[in-house]
Amino acid sequence: MRAFLGRTRVRLTATYSALFIVLAAAVSTGFYVAYARSQYSSTDTEVAERVAALINGLETDAVPITFDHKDTIPDATQGEVSAILLGIDGSVRDTIGAKPVTPALARSLLGRHPTAASPLVETASDTGGRVRILAKPVDGPTFHFLVVGSHPMTQIQTALDQAKLLLLVVVVCMVAIASALGYWLAGRALRPVRMIAGAARAISEHDLHRRIALDLPPDELGELAETFNGMLARLEAGFSTLQRFTADAAHELRAPLAMIRAELEVSLERVRSVTDYQATHRLVLTEVERMARLADQLLLLARADAGSLAPRFQRVDLSDLLEETVDRWRLLAGSRGVTVALEPPPHGAMWADPELLRRLVDNLLDNAVRHSPRGEAVTVQAACEDGRWRLEVADAGPGVPDEIRDRLFQRFTRADPARGRDTGGAGLGLALCAVIADLHGGSVVLVPPNGPPSGAHFVVDLAADPRQGATV
């Protein structure tokens, strides 16, 4: 029962019904008050007319004042008019009609001090039932009060009671109909939500390609379905990336492990010389270092995905950092017949994580040196403008194939489809560059070539102060 009452459809219906009850009660009360006033108004008009007729029929010259010619007073003989003429001391001077207004009731009205301008009109209980009475002072040789009562109010009270009952029945029926209609409308409005929920329950990680196919107008429910489809698309892309990432990481780790295992198995087949063991150890060490680099890169990317890779910003002299990094790469590049040229950057500082920034430059230089032909040069230059640093690394290699430009900064993307080991890369360097640039309020892009491929030209845009988006 609690689960049923907690359903959105039931709560919407209950809220709608409560509001409808309040509105219906207010309208019914207003109608009843207006109807009652109209009923009393007609009776008061009738009483006022009779008062005027009675006053005209008074013998005001006589002492004491009495009703004269009672037979000429309208409805006096049929008992429709009940009037009592009281003296100032409360004594009864004369009466007319069936006396539904007793002298005691008439005297009680005198304590209200009626005036000619403001006579008293009210419903009071009397021996004849509830009547509408009016008390009015009469001028004469002596001061008198005229108390007039209409015919009993039984008919009006009966009509008002019937109106109450009718309004109650109408309100109850309308609330019941409105509640049923509201329950139906709520169910119809929430039907797409139930369909979306059912589709969500039926979708697993194996069929994320499914979408919510509902013909919905562009309203809140349509926006919900579109948002849900967008979430499914992101989940599908995420799962696909995760699967590809896992497969690529396993592939990259399997190759060095297979190499290490093969070398160790060969070395253990028979006793070998010290020179052979040293060669095996050097090969194993090379593969271990490669695996360590891969694990380190994977760890950084995992931390970036989890949002826990927080740069430790400090003031860095970019020109010094570039000179120190280029000097380290010149020896390795020279062994491959490649030169690294650094155009002297302007002196200036920026707020950055020096370790991450150095890794970014290392990855770009590693990529450039490995793909540059013997005898070519890798150029590095930097400039600062409008509070942002622009770092460029260009080589004269074969360039980047058009088919992988759109996914160049995705993980495990390499120009060599066969994943040759001679390049020595795992396809994670540029992905790390993109992550590090983003953490420093910038980006890294590959500049499209103007003509035939003449190498790769990467441009890194970094904020001088990524902490606040300010310039220094």
Image (tube, rainbow, N blue to C red):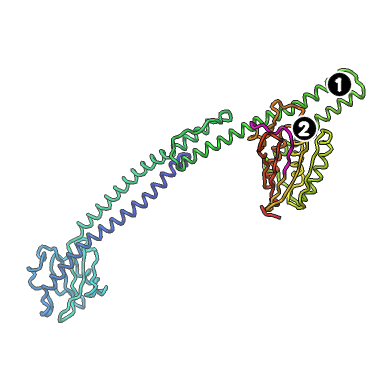
Instruction: Indicate yes or no whether the magenta region holds residue 156.
Output: no
- For the residues labelled 2 and 1, the Cα–Cα distance comes to 36 Å
Number of marks present in the image shown: 2
On the image, numbered disc 2 is attached to which residue?
Answer: 373
Q: Horizontally, is 281 left or right of 384 in the view?
A: right
Q: Amino acid at mark 2?
A: Pro
Q: Position of residue 186 (x, y in %)?
A: 41, 41
The stretch in magenta equals 392-403
Q: Horizontally, is 253 left or right of 169 in the view?
A: right
Q: In terms of depth relative to the viewer, which is nearer, 352 or 277?
A: 352
Badge 2 vs badge 1, beta-carbon distance below 8 Å: no
Find residue 73 and report its image quarter: bottom left
Q: In terms of depth relative to the viewer, which is nearer, 58 or 387?
A: 387
Q: Secondary structure at mark 1?
A: helix
- Picture residue at 71% right of the left edge, 49% below the top: 389
Q: In terms of depth relative to the viewer, which is nearer, 361 or 453?
A: 453
Q: Horizontally, is 58 left or right of 310 in the view?
A: left
User: Residue farthest to the top?
Assistant: 270
Q: Horizontally, is 66 left or right of 225 in the view?
A: left
Instruction: Indicate yes or no whether the magenta region holds residue 393.
Output: yes
On the image, numbered disc 1 is attached to which residue?
Answer: 267
Q: Please identify, in this view, whether the residue under mark 2 or under mark 1 is nearer the observer.
A: 2
User: Residue farthest to the front?
Assistant: 451
Rendered position, 140 above or below 296: below
